[in-house]
């Protein structure tokens, strides 16, 4: 028998018995699906009609929906079975979801040999076996329980708090100018600063039934002005919760704020943040947002059919060395200052930061850790006392520097220097203990003093070293504040 005839008979026999074809009918299709480009691939609809590369690309985009911008990894699993002119294979599909988790499943690929060429069938059921015609995959998420920030004794100092979103509904406004004047007075009555100067323009630009956001108030603050707001034409409110510190002022610059994710944060998140998500905006809440936010519950759905569910993972705890009583005492001591001010307290024995308070006019800026306060020689070796030393606190900070004319640093570094003199050597201050910000810096050499800092009050009382700074003022102003704080330590 001639060799060519033998080969033909063998190929025909393989086709009838389900053997592996000499050519993979699905190789080009698998590559095209991963790229969303079926150029050069012969395709058919599930009903057998020809499907162009452009039509296939649109069908794929419509079916993949929210996942279309993310390309899956597609790989054939096992052998291709062929019976006569029909081929079938199993393919594995692996999607990387926005939060990095993977959704993997198997689907069936089918092809038919038409005029000597393999044509692969493409429809929603190929993209996922449970997809009906016309279905579109969508992502649906629900936030995890956000983690909390803890004080040294385990007291939550940032946790979910009831809030009220206060806004304006344009169609209910009768007199814009009168509304602006009244809102300004109402917000001032609870010492909440809200800039309403741009409100007229925002109202004109909004749809009649839109919610033009003004401010988010703690429920306790809202209750004080609830009647006034209810009697104001155009005001609308919505209840909610936000992770907030113990009080409006408690450690605000250090602990930071949270709120709906901004466009800038969403764009920079790589898909982990979406419109409406609550995220840390400043301070520790921003720095540790990923840990605090946890991992949301994520579902892939199509026409209310759930194709995949990734469970939520609750947010982690951020534990600090802050003492609630000491922090409150520091803020009380600064409450009457007109200028920007800060008070930092550090425990001498272990370097724990007990309080980091900023005065009423800090406007969210953590002067306690970031101010660049210059002093002439302080009576001790500035470098040995920690100025300019490389160390990590777990928060944004400035470690200071030694200059030709003295030292520069924030109140934190001056307080740490006072603790170093009392201890006999410098030791890195500690603020965040969980999660660890990294290994501590090595202890410094011996420090002898006395420490003298003109223009500020830097003291040690018992096991607490502290620094009081008031911008533009001297010890005649910082001294009484330090006295008041020292008395609170004795109580």
Image (spheres, grey):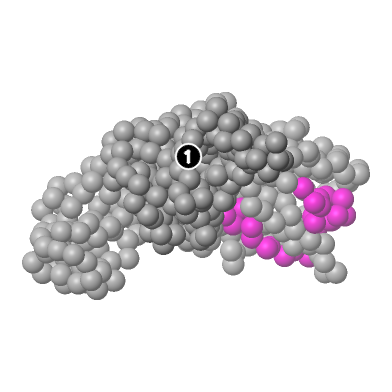
Q: Is residue 15 visible?
A: yes
Give the total of numbered labels: 1
Residue underneath mark 1: 85
Does the magenta portion include 130? no
Give the image location of residue 105, x and y in percent: 50, 32
Q: Looking at the image, which residue is at 28% across and 36% down?
A: 304
Where residue 351 sits, quadrant-wise, is top right
Q: Residue extending furthest front?
A: 1
Q: Nearer the viewer, residue 268 or 490?
A: 268
Q: Residue extending furthest right?
A: 445
Q: Nearer the viewer, residue 133 or 310?
A: 133
Q: Nearer the viewer, residue 73 or 466?
A: 73
**Would you place residue 27 above or below residue 300 in this image?**
below
Q: Is residue 253 visible?
A: no
Where residue 233 sits, quadrant-wise, is bottom left
Where residue 52 sits, quadrant-wise, is bottom left
Q: Looking at the image, which residue is at 25% across and 52% down?
A: 166
Q: Looking at the image, which residue is at 42% across and 40% down?
A: 126
């Amino acid at each position: 028998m001639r060799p060519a005839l033998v080969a033909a008979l063998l190929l025909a026999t393989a086709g009838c018995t389900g053997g592996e074809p000499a050519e993979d009918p699905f190789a080009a299709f698998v590559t095209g699906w991963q790229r969303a480009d079926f150029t050069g691939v012969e395709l058919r609809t599930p009903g057998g009609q020809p499907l162009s590369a452009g039509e296939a690309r649109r069908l794929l985009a419509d079916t993949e929906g929210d996942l279309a911008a993310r390309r899956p990894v597609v790989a054939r699993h096992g052998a291709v079975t062929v019976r006569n002119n029909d081929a079938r294979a199993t393919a594995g599909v692996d999607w990387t979801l926005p939060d990095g988790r993977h959704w993997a499943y198997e689907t069936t690929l089918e092809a038919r040999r038409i005029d000597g060429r393999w044509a692969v069938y493409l429809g929603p059921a190929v993209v996922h076996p449970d997809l009906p015609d016309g279905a579109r995959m969508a992502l649906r998420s629900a936030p995890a329980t956000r983690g909390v920030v803890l004080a040294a004794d385990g007291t939550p100092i940032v946790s979910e708090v009831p809030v009220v979103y206060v806004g304006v509904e344009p169609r209910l406004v009768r007199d814009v100018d009168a509304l602006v004047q009244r809102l300004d007075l109402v917000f001032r009555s609870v010492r909440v600063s809200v800039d309403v100067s741009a409100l007229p323009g925002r109202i004109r630009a909004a749809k009649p039934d839109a919610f033009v956001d003004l401010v988010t108030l703690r429920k306790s603050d809202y209750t004080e002005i609830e009647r006034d707001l209810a009697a104001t034409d155009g005001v609308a409110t919505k209840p909610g919760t936000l992770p907030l510190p113990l009080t409006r002022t408690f450690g605000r610059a250090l602990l930071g704020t949270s709120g709906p994710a901004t466009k800038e944060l969403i764009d920079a998140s790589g898909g982990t943040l979406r419109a409406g998500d609550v995220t840390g905006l400043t301070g520790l809440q921003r720095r540790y947002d990923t840990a605090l936010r946890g991992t949301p519950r994520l579902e892939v759905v199509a026409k209310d059919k759930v194709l995949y569910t990734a469970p939520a993972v609750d947010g982690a705890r951020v534990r600090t060395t802050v003492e609630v009583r000491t922090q409150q005492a520091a803020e009380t001591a600064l409450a009457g200052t007109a200028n920007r001010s800060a008070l930092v307290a550090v425990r001498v024995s272990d370097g724990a930061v007990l309080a980091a308070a900023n005065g009423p006019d800090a406007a969210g800026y953590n002067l306690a850790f970031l101010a660049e306060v210059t002093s002439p020689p302080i009576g001790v070796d500035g470098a040995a006392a920690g100025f300019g030393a490389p160390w990590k606190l777990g928060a944004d900070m400035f470690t200071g520097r030694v200059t030709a004319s003295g030292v520069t640093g924030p109140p934190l570094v001056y307080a740490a220097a006072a603790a170093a003199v009392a201890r006999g050597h410098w030791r890195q201050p500690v603020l965040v203990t969980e999660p660890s910000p990294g290994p501590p810096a090595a202890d410094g050499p011996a420090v002898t003093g006395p420490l003298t800092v003109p223009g500020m009050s830097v003291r040690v009382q018992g096991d607490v070293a502290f620094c009081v700074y008031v911008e533009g003022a001297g010890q005649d102003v910082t001294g009484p504040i330090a006295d008041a704080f020292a008395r609170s330590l004795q109580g």
